[in-house]
Image: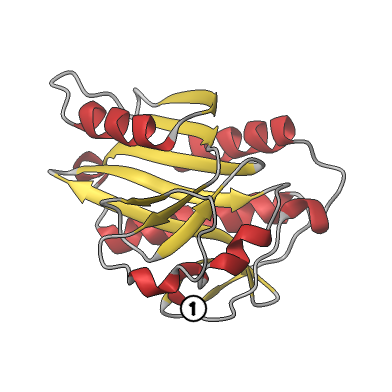
Amino acid sequence: MLEDLTFKSLGTANYHETLELMKSHIKKEDFNNEIWLLEHPPIFTLGTAADKSHILEPKDIPIVQTDRGGEVTYHGPGQLVIYFLLDVKKLDFGPRKLVFTIQTFIKELLKNISIECDFVEGAPGVYVDKKKIASIGLRISKGKSYHGISLNFDMDLSPFKQINPCGYKGLEVTQIKDLNKDISKLQLEAKAIDLLRKIF
């Protein structure tokens, strides 16, 4: 367990600025473990091995190349993005264990609000009836993790049609508001923080 874990609710944050802040945070001499909860203005992001041809029609949505794992995804208003800036060496977590732990956390969170979900072998993320509800992409550098998971809450899902989400042609996406109308974003964040405190 991490004794110095801090949670930060950052509201709406520019993607480029957040990426730079994450990179500088993990390099700090006085590094402390933090989990950031936020959302981004509309943007398509590409993982390190992403194939740009999976962006079918960007229209006016910016595209950024990132240093996380995974393929192409979309971030936009109404999504809960959670970034994990953790000393995984101290936790004794390898990449697989970290991915599995984060996916299991989302499964627990959704179960908590009466949404049943599952995982798909070889396709990281979380799915409800084969529709993707959460995308995961991480980076580990010198024993520290950054990037994380995005959970679709109450958003315009149409930009996902402008890409092959996570590199899968025709992959459908879903969101919490279409499955449970009674939960607010603040309640969701509070539940997420409670669960994460127990996990880390």
Q: Choose between 163 and 121: the one closer to the eye.
A: 163
Q: What residue is drawn where x is 41% and y is 79%?
A: 122
Does residue 71 appear to the left or right of 40 in the view shown?
left
Does residue 179 appear to the left or right of 6 in the view shown?
right
Q: Residue furthest front?
A: 59
Which picture quadrant has residue 101?
bottom left
The quadrant of the image that shows the C terminus is top left
Does residue 113 appear to the left or right of 52 in the view shown?
right
Is residue 20 shown above or below 65? above
Name the spot of residue 35 as percent of width and height, x first: 43, 33
Name the spot of residue 139 as percent of width and height, x first: 27, 51
Provide the secondary structure element on which disc 1 rests. Answer: loop
Q: How many marks?
A: 1
Is residue 68 shown above or below 162? above
Q: What residue is drawn where x is 27% and y is 59%?
A: 95
Q: What residue is drawn where x is 31% and y is 42%?
A: 146
Q: Choose between 141 and 94: the one closer to the eye.
A: 141
Does residue 85 appear to the left or right of 35 in the view shown?
left
Name the spot of residue 43 as percent of width and height, x first: 49, 47
Name the spot of residue 32 as percent of width and height, x first: 28, 24
Is residue 78 shown above or below 12? below
The quadrant of the image that shows the N terminus is top left
Which picture quadrant has residue 143?
top left
Q: Choose between 101 and 54: the one closer to the eye.
A: 54
Res. 99 visible in picture? yes
Q: Residue furthest right?
A: 182
Residue named by callout 1:
168
Q: Residue furthest top?
A: 30
Q: Choose between 198 and 65: the one closer to the eye.
A: 65
Q: What residue is drawn where x is 33% and y is 53%?
A: 138
Q: Amino acid at mark 1?
A: Tyr
